[in-house]
Amino acid sequence: MYGTIARLHPSPGREDDLIAYGSRIREVEVPGYRASYVFRPDANPYDRPTLFLVAVFDDQASYVANAESSDQNERYLEMRSMLDDDPEWIDGTFEG
């Protein structure tokens, strides 16, 4: 499996909106998509509110095809409107 983990800094007052967005995108039908989650740490070690987005695909080809699609760009722009800055993306292989 392949995917990404993104560190997100929600804009003030948008944290719950971002979590709701994460629930909605789980319903989107994308070839090779397996799952996604928004993770809220119990103890935030950062200097501002921080969430993490985890998205899992069957393989790297499915992930890249989605990332390059215009539909995904629209979803990204919606998510980005709720953030203070661009996400920090870490792409890679999920083991186990």
Image (cartoon, rainbow, N blue to C red):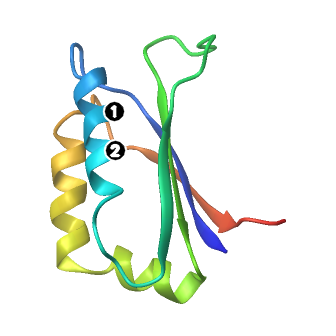
SS label for mark 2: helix
- Label count reads 2
- Alpha carbon distance from label 1 to label 2: 5 Å
Residue at x 49% of width, y 46% of height: 37
Residue displayed at 29% across by 55% down: 25
Callout 1: SS: helix
Image coordinates of residue 31 in percent, x first then y, are 39, 84
Give coordinates of residue 61: x percent, y percent. Answer: 52, 89
Does residue 32 appear to the left or right of 91 in the view shown? left
Density class for disc 2 (Cα within 10 Å; few <14, some 14-19, many ≥20) is some
List the single residue furthest toward the front.
27
**Residue type beneath disc 1:** Ile
Q: Is residue 24 above or below residue 58?
A: above
- Label 1–label 2 contact, CB within 8 A: yes
Quadrant of the image occupied by residue 66? bottom left
In which quadrant is the N terminus drawn? bottom right
**Relative to residue 14, is residue 8 depicted above or below?**
below
**Residue at the extreme right:** 96
The structure residue drawn at horizontal position 81% and vertical position 66%, both measured from the top left corner, is 95
Tag 2 residue: 22
Name the residue located 30 percent from the left edge and 60 percent from the top edge.
27
Q: Is residue 38 above or below residue 45?
A: below
x then y, percent, for residue 4: 55, 59
Quadrant containing the C terminus is bottom right
- Quarter of the figure with residue 73: bottom left
Q: Position of residue 81 (x, y in %)?
A: 16, 39
Left or right: where 20 falls relative to 35? left
According to the picture, the residue beneath numbered tag 1 turns out to be 19
Task: Identify residue type, mark 2.
Answer: Gly
Q: Residues within 10 Å of mark 1 (few under 14, many from 20)?
A: some
Q: Seen in the image, is 69 located left or right of residue 67?
A: left
